[in-house]
Image (cartoon, rainbow, N blue to C red):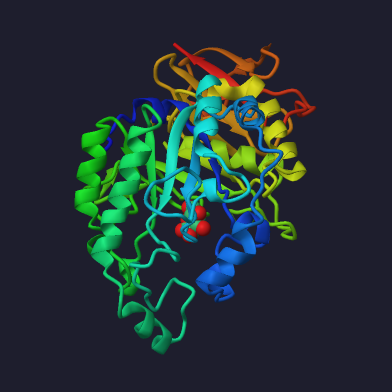
Amino acid sequence: MEIRPTAGDSSWFVHDRFGLFITWGLYSLGARREWLRMEEKIPTDVYRQRYFNHFDPDLYDPCAWADAAADAGMKYFVITTKHHEGFCMWDTQHTDFKVTHTPARRDLILPAVDAFRNRGLRVGFYYSLIDWDHPHYRYDAHYGPWHDPADRERLNATRDQSKYAQYIRDQVTELLTRYGGIDMMWFDFSYPYVDGKNHNDWQSQQLYDLVRRLQPHVLINDRLDLPDGWDFKTPEKTRPREWVAVNGQQVVWEACHPFSVTWGYNRDEGNWKSTEQLVQMLIDSVSKGGNLLLNVGPTARGEFDQRAMDRLRGIGRWMRHHSRSIYGCTQAPQEYPTPEDCRLTWNPQTRRLYAHVLAWPFKDLYLDGLAGKVEYAQILNDASELKMLGPVSDYDKQRQSLTLQLPTVKPDVAVPVVELFLK
Ligand code: GLC
């Protein structure tokens, strides 16, 4: 089946498969959730006073971030230039609610872009369409710090959403003209499904055309609420069951997940996924033709905390031996059924099939449909040969089944991988 073509360049994206999301802003000081301004109904001036004068990421070292991402095997990064709170992490000319006016006193996006680029990673910008600070952003009944309809009406009386849409275009123009070639724009988000903000509120078509004009190759995500104006789908905090499709056609897609539940730094949250789960999530995406964008919420001092570092290092240990089953790989052809307790990925260039064994069995790994088709088989982490048998029984013959003889002891890696060289 043909995959839906993209207007932006997705060739690198479907090869690289694994990226780092960075959610960082004033809310990192609150250390509970990037939505705290809405959840706690904090008025604009209070929010500004409380956090603006205290944002001082004195330990910020973007080279250390880039190293952590590259060592984990990530090939691109997407950083919050502005989240829903409206605070800008770069030196924009269009608002004073920006990082250069805090004790940080410098553009924080520029050094990140340089550092990650120097480590060979591609660059993506997250830009929130939702903006709880801008004087012309109209408050609605769904997402915003104003829950009381009377308050909203009073505040909206002076608001002209089209001025806000112009502000988006002005800011996106800065982002796409000051930092060299940008590989991805990650807009967040529209909510027409609850009769909330939609493409009209952002003037999405104009925005889309502007982005395409400024940087024709940039990949654009799917949250502008345009029927055709997107390159890839962004399932959030879910694990799709199969290759993501729109109108029956498979599309380029990327699952995004935080380590825990929230995206910004959350000191007290306990629900962190284990390294093994995270590795499995990456494998699961690639086995369905998708990518994984894994999020870290740096502290307000500018560091990835220990929990994040432990996991990134753990993923890196796995990637060191197994990235061959991820980069350049995709869903396996239908003719190769997924073996028990496994996920398959496939590299069409090298014609190698990778069986990721999620539960290590005793000895026999049965591979239906592969009898006579495999030239050589090995465990990937140490390139140790695996003996191939069969088909022996009538059962195996019917299913054209090949049997691999696995060692009894599971290799000491998060998820062992069997590499099959097809004839
Ligand atoms: C969301 C949330 C947000 C997060 C983002 C990542 O819809 O509003 O906090 O940054 O998606 O996908």
Residue pictured at 32% horizontal, 34% vertical: 218
Residue 328 position within the rendered picture, expressed as x and y whole percent measured from the top left:
45, 23
Residue 260 or 198: which is nearer the viewer? Answer: 198
**Residue 249 is drawn in which quadrant?**
top left
Residue 173 position within the rendered picture, expressed as x and y whole percent measured from the top left:
30, 41
Residue pictured at 21% horizontal, 36% vertical: 213
Residue 110 position within the rendered picture, expressed as x and y whole percent measured from the top left:
50, 33
**Residue 407 is drawn in which quadrant?**
top right
- The image shows residue 263, relative to residue 401, as above or below, that is below
Q: Is residue 419 left or right of residue 181?
A: right
Q: Is residue 67 left or right of residue 200?
A: right
Residue 403 or 348: which is nearer the viewer? Answer: 348
Number of dots carrying numbers: 0
Residue 71 or 358: which is nearer the viewer? Answer: 71
Residue 342 seen in render: yes
Residue pictured at 26% horizontal, 62% vertical: 163
- The image shows residue 41, relative to residue 294, as above or below, that is below
Residue 404 seen in render: no
